[in-house]
Image: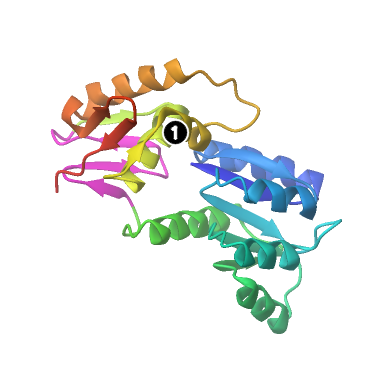
Amino acid sequence: MRLLLAEDDPELVAMLKKDLQNAGYAVDVADNGVDAEYLGNEMIYDVAVLDLGLPRRNGIDVLKNWRTAGNHLPVIVLTARNAWHERVDGFRAGADDYLGKPFHVEELLARITALLHRSSQQPGGELQSAGISLDEATQTLTTEDGKTYKLTGVEFRLLRYFILNAGHVLSKSRLMEHVYDFDSEKDSNVIEVYVRRLRQLIGSERIETRRGQGYVFVDKG
């Protein structure tokens, strides 16, 4: 899953980016509101963490512009402003959740997970799909026969994206957009390698190939 972090505090960015990557997210950073608005409109992100106090364009205006343009990107507002009316302003502008500074990273991660599950109409906790389960905290897969496998970062992000988008045709380019950040080297052939690896773990029938289109994750439940 790919995340947009719109925050101008370099120390906080450095800490959050590392923690978010360790939690299985491909992370891009915008340190001002103009860049944040532009990137958010690229439609390549699954969730955004948006600071209200951004330079050049504040987070409220960024969020309002996204929503006015019909951009439904799930957004967690992150801010040092704790006045109740400012929280209300954030929600009125279209925020999905709100977290005031200072905060614990674990709470932010939990809110991101809950928001992604809610947006994809998936229950909270582990991601389940007809006999297999994906533990997002440990990035492990448990298969139908009860075996547990530790996944690599890309394997985890890819399988999580498949499960959250079960039944949809996903092109290689779309998968790359949501699995890798801008700093990663991208090769469409690598997606084929990871799909082959996931098929070995969960069964080839779980990930169908649609010639000329991409892949479909099949939820057998």
Q: Position of residue 6 (x, y in %)?
A: 71, 51
- On the rendered structure, is 206 left or right of 140? left
Q: Quadrant of residue 155?
A: top left
Q: Residue at x 25, y 48 (%)?
A: 128
Q: Along the line of sight, which residue is nearer the eye, 22 or 44?
A: 44
The figure's colour scheme reads rainbow
Q: What stretch is highlighted in magenta?
A: 126-146
Q: Is residue 105 above or below residue 99?
A: above
- On the rendered structure, is 192 left or right of 18? left
Q: Where is residue 5 in the image (x, y as percent from the top left)?
A: 66, 48
Q: Where is residue 140 in the image (x, y as percent from the top left)?
A: 34, 35
- Whether 143 is among the magenta residues is yes
SS class of the residue under badge 1?
A: helix
Q: Provide the residue designation for mark 1.
A: 175
Q: Residue at x 61, y 65 (%)?
A: 67
Q: In which quarter of the image is residue 207?
A: top left
Q: Along the line of sight, which residue is nearer the eye, 82 or 51?
A: 51
Q: In this view, does 91 lie above or below 187?
A: below
Q: Among all residues in the image, which is located at the extreme bottom?
A: 85
